[in-house]
Image (tube, rainbow, N blue to C red):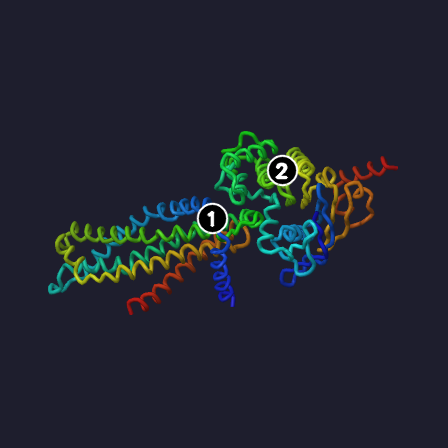
Amino acid sequence: MIDVRDIHKSFGDAHILKGVTTTFEKGKTNLIIGQSGSGKTVFLKCLLGLFVPEEGGIAYDGKLYSDHTDDEKRELRQEMGMVFQGSALFDSMTVEGNVMFPLEMFTNQSKSEMKDRVDAVLKRVNLIDAHHKFPSEISGGMQKRVAIARAIVMNPKYLFCDEPNSGLDPKTAILIDDLIKEITEEYNITTVINTHDMNSVMQIGEKIIFLKDGLLEWEGTKNEIFKTENEAVTNFVYSSDLFKKVRQMYIQEQN
Amino acid sequence: MNYLASVGSYAIMIREVFKKPTKWRIMKSLIFKEIDELIFSSLGIIIFISFFIGAVVAIQTALNLTNPLIPRNLIGFATRQSVILEFAPTFVSIIMAGKVGSYITSSIGTMRVTEQIDALEVMGVNSLNYLVFPKIIAMLFYPFAIAISMYVGIFGGWMAGVFGGFLTSEDFITGLQSDFVPFHIAYAFVKTLIFAFVIATIPSFHGFYMRGGALEVGKASTTAFVWTSVAIIILNYILTQLLLG
């Protein structure tokens, strides 16, 4: 579980996060939504420990990040998996090398043990024959799956995803969403996803938080987002005619 | 003020490079890879340039020796001194600042742009140690490349002098051996080692701390070349004053 307590983050004069408080529960897919410039990426980087908030704190399973020693912070980092927007795979390594990288860095496993683990996670993300290909030789969807495999290879407690569906066709995007949700439940991890994709919100959003101008404007589940009267949320989520109709149909069905 | 801040950031980066080392098993393979990419892949251009510069130094000296009282073996002497003292350690280092430096900046800068450095950081890897330390160690082999440059430069001078009909082979070798000061070799290699550190770290700094996209990677490479060259020129002056002055 991740407990975010009134965090503030500024860059120079720009006050990006103005006091965000929320909780991300274990075994659930938590989504962060909001317009561009609302502070989503900064928020995610604070959760990852890449940015340190000036005020407030973030507790991982009850212990504040700032209370961790350097060694504990390093250990905590090894319990985090991250799927970047552009996958961020290492160009110079094969798919197998990318997935094996955290194992080589942080475990003392033998080569065959590492290979077995890599085979297992690549199989889990439905990538069977791509072991010896380089990232430039595989599609965007496959790169995302490799990124997910690399993120889960160390059995993380926390999984963070930044726009996991960006640049993917709708079908592949759904496959990636489903994969993240399945992995979250299977490994019982705390998953936090930064997204613009409303399909993801409807599909896998067990908890959704809406950021606006660096503040937490709204939070709830995917069912609650259909009913909300919050104008900022409805303007953002139901900006397209298709989603407006989906919402109307949902409300009619409920009535 | 910005320059001072950059110098401070550079110093902090150097400190971070040596903290929290990467596992030796991984570091070893990274070092071998960097030796291949930074040193071996540069040998061709180093040999090519050294040969012709050595040849030109010999011809220029020969053409300027108009006084018949000055012995022809001075051509060998001048070629040796020019190549060992300045051309090989300094001139080749400036060329390497362009070749190796731009490679370092663009490769690290591209990793920054594509979030690969963020990925390392998120995993808890000391990205500066992982990316820059192997380059520093690989560049410790740079003096070997400079030794080859010295040899080939002098050989080029001999070829141009002898086959150009400016002096005999014996004259050239006599000049080569006259007034030889072994400390000049030590001076050249001390300079080379310091330039090697500069070539490995200044371009790394510009790549690591760059912001933006592909265009900025190109700009960072150019900036890195300029500042590496400036640092080499200034350090060359200071080291010459300290060691030979």
From the viewer's perspective, is A191 left or right of B183? right
**Residue most extreme to the bottom:** B245
Count residues near mark 1 (Cα–Cα under 10 Å), then give few for <14, some for 14-19, many for 20+.
Answer: some
* Dot 1 and dot 2 within a common chain: no
From the viewer's perspective, is B76 left or right of B46? left
From the viewer's perspective, is A122 left or right of B44? right
Q: Which residue is mark 1?
A: B107
Q: Residue B100: x, y in percent?
A: 40, 51
Q: Which quadrant of the structure image shows residue B25? A: top left
From the viewer's side, name the closer residue of A165 and B165: A165
Q: Which mark is residue A202?
A: none
From the viewer's perspective, is A11 left or right of B34? right
Q: Residue A142: x, y in percent?
A: 58, 35
From the viewer's side, name the closer residue of A50 and A247: A50
From the viewer's side, name the closer residue of A111 and A192: A111
Residue at 50%, 57% (x, y): give it. B16
Question: Mark 1 belongs to which subunit?
Answer: B
Q: Residue A250: x, y in percent?
A: 82, 37
Give the amino acid type for the residue marked by disc 1 in the picture.
Answer: Ser
Q: Are marks 1 and 2 in contact (CB under 8 Å)?
A: no
Secondary structure beneath disc 2?
loop
CA–CA distance in space, label 1 to label 2 = 26 Å
Q: Which residue is mark 2?
A: A168
Q: Quadrant of the C terminus of chain B?
A: bottom left
Give the amino acid type for the residue marked by disc 2 in the picture.
Answer: Leu
